Amino acid sequence: MSLIVQKFGGSSVSDAEGIKRVAQRVVDTQAAGNQVVVVVSAMGDTTDELLDLANQISSDRSAREMDMLLSAGERISMSLLAMAIQEFGSRAQSFTGSQAGMVTDAIHGKARIIDVSPHRVLTTIERGDIAIVAGFQGISQESNDITTLGRGGSDTTAVALAAALGADVCEIYTDVDGIYTADPRVVHSAKKIDTISSEEMLEMAASGSKILHLRCVEYARRFGVKLHVRSSFSTNEGTWVLPSPDDKIKIQEGEPLEQPIISGVAHDRSEAKVTILGVPDIPGKAAEIFGIVAGAHSNIDMIVQNISTRGTGKTDISFTLPMVEGKEALDALNAAQDVVGFEGILYNENVGKLSLIGAGMRSNPGVSYKFFEALHKAGVNVDMISTSEIRISIVTHADLLDTAVRAVHAAFGLDTDEEATVYGGTGR
Amino acid sequence: MSLIVQKFGGSSVSDAEGIKRVAQRVVDTQAAGNQVVVVVSAMGDTTDELLDLANQISSDRSAREMDMLLSAGERISMSLLAMAIQEFGSRAQSFTGSQAGMVTDAIHGKARIIDVSPHRVLTTIERGDIAIVAGFQGISQESNDITTLGRGGSDTTAVALAAALGADVCEIYTDVDGIYTADPRVVHSAKKIDTISSEEMLEMAASGSKILHLRCVEYARRFGVKLHVRSSFSTNEGTWVLPSPDDKIKIQEGEPLEQPIISGVAHDRSEAKVTILGVPDIPGKAAEIFGIVAGAHSNIDMIVQNISTRGTGKTDISFTLPMVEGKEALDALNAAQDVVGFEGILYNENVGKLSLIGAGMRSNPGVSYKFFEALHKAGVNVDMISTSEIRISIVTHADLLDTAVRAVHAAFGLDTDEEATVYGGTGR
């Protein structure tokens, strides 16, 4: 008997029919001899409707009250799911984040989990019942107030519960069949990945892959939780995200031991490129600039500092940051121009980032050559480069991004003939 | 400085505009130098929408999950109200039933309050903030599950909080200006009652007056809570419901001490009349019949047993019960016909009940005479009669009920020339 945590997003439970379909799936999983804990998001449009109401009432909304408001969403979906499961003849009980022991800090709207004590969930499944837990929400240790976990919250709830319960697997149900070697909407020949390590998945998520949120993958890697990303519309095996390379080999027993070097190609259009011109080339200036950006609550991603070429003692520093944070960062930088002593700022939102991810990359010097050759042949200019042991990322012109993704995907032999299944829509 | 508990029903907070209007009222009350605790129901249609969703999913719904589902409604209204109050520049925090310390038994859907520990509410108002509490909901002592209080729940939450906090008054906001001497929709000349004792109000509520639920009046009487029933659409004084006659006199200092004998006329169309024909006139038979009806979960209201007139050793027993419980009671009675040995059953839904209520009634023998004379002159036949020390009720044909109410109302000098204000709609 396995203990399985299953997470369903808002698009899977957007109406009564969706809730019944999910209920059927949960009941089938239990009937196959498993203990089942279900984590569920708010129904499809609920969150937007609640936000709309709040907007009608207040522009400067209290974060505590917003969390109270939004947490109503999962109460609705989880109690309805419990009823739907009971309608199939199984026993189910729903639990709020607080009842499920999801203890967080007091940062409303983006609370971090600090403890998970799922006593009631455990009692429920040990009795042979199905436990349903509200995703996205918890209770603050400090104030006993309702909190929400922010982006990627429901996935993180599922992984945190799986870790605390020692679950055999955490299944993340989504509207695609799994993780693909590239976005199937851009690369039609993209291939579903059967297994990927947590580390590689982390790089994929950080590089723009939208299927799993970075935070949930981090949590899974840290606590050794096996993730299975799969479609709620089919019973096909999806993608296994495995916390250690040993597991990755173990799960593939009977398959060829030769691992593919490259896991996939991710891309991201959500960043902008900032270039600070004529920065005095003296120690501490880069830190000063990044400090200003951080002070404007912006997260810098890639950084390139050019060598001081003009013999003027001045250099240029380029970096990327999320487009939505661009204005605030620019305002802060402009205000500090005289103090820092740079000459000007260039700001460009028309850029795209492409990342090639694979655990075998570090031990294979031919990878970079093949990567840049493919980009060159496809006529893609490279603006910025950054690398880690298992990733190469480049920034190019946004219009060239799709071409670049397809070229790299093909060059590394990732193309397949099978058609990817894409349903569209995202949960929280 | 007074401590005021204000309760607003679903029709007062049915949309963003309504919520802002309530917020203004709450802020004004605080600005006048009071501590304010607000109890709020779910927004207008929320409960119906949630019930509709549940109906789409399951016909035999778990009571525990229904409570979880319905309790989402107040989270939405109370957090939005907190935001609206903050928008006016005041500080407010919302609390669920559980957070406000509303501890109940575990009877889902109609839980009874067993303890109220409003520590967090108290801390909030002592700090000078406004506390908003979800009506209608609590947490079960036994299982720590979310419960709902059932009919009249939000009013009862408000009264229970007022009692636990030692509030100076519990204001129940509604869509009429207060309690009237009769339903203004039937008697256009009905008069608003300025003060009424809890006992009389209890008889009014039990006799079909819809403004206050019996349960909330019972709680207020038991714990000595002063109620002020008033309109959320005006700032007029409403009706004070006072737990002891002393208070009633005290509050009217400066007004004539001569109390009106009669408080008002209530009516009720929701009951049916059952007559059991030819019941053996031996001890225990009536108890046997009422036991069968109770076993079918039906509440008997009025009872009339005719004298055994036919010399046959048989008698007829008539009683009224809620129409919605009629079918189940009839089924149970029919099944027991041979055992009890009665001859037949008459069932009539086309009846109406009229009640005259007044504390002075017992010491005034002229009241019954005037009452029946008014009915007689209006051509109203009387089917059943029942009395208490402060009430006379009769059952008549449903079609004659409005005529009867107007006749009795006029006979006791309750008519006024002012036009009553009626807005329509009910909360939970």
Image (cartoon, coloured by chain):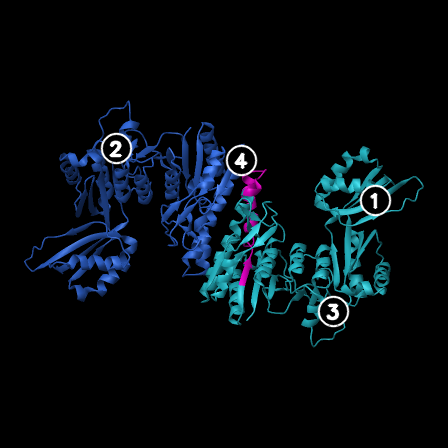
Chain colours: A cyan, B blue
- Disc 4 marks a residue whose amino acid type is Gln
Quadrant into which the C terminus of chain B falls: top left
Could you tell me residue B94's position as x and y percent?
49, 41
Is B232 in front, or is B91? B91
Residue found at x 81% / y 33%:
A339
Q: Which residue has dot 3 on it?
A: A416
Residue B339 lies, with reference to residue B4, above or below; the image says below
- Disc 2 marks a residue whose amino acid type is Pro
Left or right position of B208 against A130: left
Is A310 in front, or is B407? A310
Cα–Cα gap, marks 2 and 1 = 83 Å
Determine crowd level at label 2: few under 14, some 14-19, many 20+ residues with C-alpha closer than 10 A: some
In the image, farthest residue toward the right: A311
Cα–Cα gap, marks 2 and 4 = 40 Å
Q: How many marks?
A: 4
Is label 3 in a helix, a strand or a loop? loop
